[in-house]
Image (cartoon, rainbow, N blue to C red):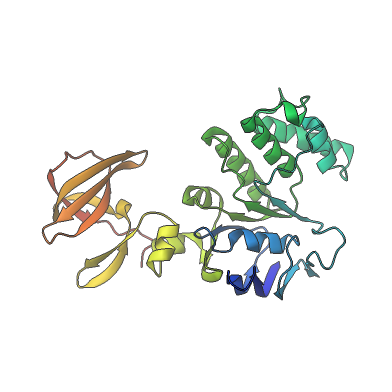
Amino acid sequence: MLRISQLEKAYGTKQGKALGRLSLLIKENSFTAILGHSGSGKSTLLHLIAGLTQADHGEIWWRGNRVGGPLAKLVPGEVGIALVSQADLLLPMHTVYEQMEFKIRHLREAEKSRRIKQIIGLLGLAGLKGKRVNELSGGERQRVNLGVQLCAYTPLLLLDEPFTYLDSAYRQKVLNWLNELKMQKKTTLLMATHLPSEAFSLCERALILNKGKKVFFGDLKEAYFNPKNLYQAQVLGEAEELELTGKTSLVRPEWWQLSKDGLQVMVEQIQFSPYGFNCLVINRQGDQFHVLLAEEPRLNEEIRVSLRIPPHHS
C-alpha cells in the first residue's frame, strides 16, 4: 500500500503551496489518474513519491517503508519506485541499446534482454538500437527517452505526462502494454495527465487536484458522472452549468440526444469530432450550451433535444 500523510510542499513564499497537507491511501495493483489544471501539483506529488523532491512536511510510506527525500539519501530516489517523465535523461554518445542496458543493469541477463526486446518492439525502435543518441531526430529521441525509462518499470510506476510527444499510434500501443501490466496485478500505477482519454483508457481511480488541494479521490466513473463542481467536471471533459427543472445541474454535451418532445433549440455552430457532431445551440430564453449528436444537423436549423441520463448518474 502507498500511504501519504499530511504531505506539504512550497516553492518560495510568493508562489504559495504546490501541495497542501495532502493525505491518501492507495491500494497496491490499482491504477490511478492524477488530473488537474497546470500548476495544480500533479508533477510535484509524483516527484515527492519518487523521493526526488524533499517535502516540507508529512510522510510517504510504500510497502511499510518510509520514502525519504534527497536529504535522506546520497543518491535521491527509491528502489522499487520508477518515475517516467518528459525529462531527457539520455547520454549523447551511447547507442540506444546501451542506454536501455545501462538503465536496467541490475537485472539478470535473461530479464534484461526480454525487457529491451519488448520496449524496442513497442516503440518501433528496432532500426535505431545501434544508433547513438546524437544521430537521432527529435521525434526519435523522444521515443527512445520514453523507452529507456519504461525499461525500468517497477512495482510502483509513476508516469508524469510522458506521452505528450508520442503520435496517436505509439501512444495507444503504450497504453495497451500498460493495460497488460495491469492485468498481471503486479504493478501499482499513478499517472499524471491532462487528457481524460488517457485516464479513461487505463485507470479505474482518479485523484483531482486544484492549487495543491485534493478536490476528489475515488472511482473514476463517479468523478465523471457525478461531479461535485464545475472544476471537477471540466477536468474530465466538456461540461456546463445549466438551469434545468428549477435547479442548477452540471451537464455534459454527450448526455443530450435528439427527441421529438424535447427542448426546442437552434443550431448556431457545428464542429465535427470522432464521437459525433458537437453543436452550440441556443434556446428560446437565449441560453447557449453544447450538445453532442450522432447525426449532423443543419446550421440555423431548429431541433429538439432531451437529456439522456447516464446509468451511473445520481
Foreground residue among 141 and 159:
141
Q: Residue at x 88, y 61 (%)?
A: 74
* Location of residue 91 by image quarter: top right
Using residue 29 as the reference point, say whether residue 66 is left or right of it. right
Vertical position of residue 302 compared to residue 309: above or below? above
Q: Residue at x 77, y 46 (%)?
A: 152
Q: Residue at x 65, y 33 (%)?
A: 123
Foreground residue among 182 and 214:
214
Vertical position of residue 97 compared to residue 62: above or below? above
Residue 101 percent across, percent down from the top left: 83, 37
Residue 278 percent across, percent down from the top left: 29, 45
Residue 300 percent across, percent down from the top left: 13, 43
Vertical position of residue 60 compared to residue 144: above or below? below
**Circle count:** 0
Foreground residue among 53 and 104:
53
Q: Residue at x 44, y 56 (%)?
A: 236
Residue most extreme to the top: 127
Residue 226 visible in image: no
Q: Quadrant of the N terminus?
A: bottom right
Residue 79 visible in image: yes
Q: Quadrant of the C terminus?
A: bottom left
Residue 109 percent across, percent down from the top left: 88, 37
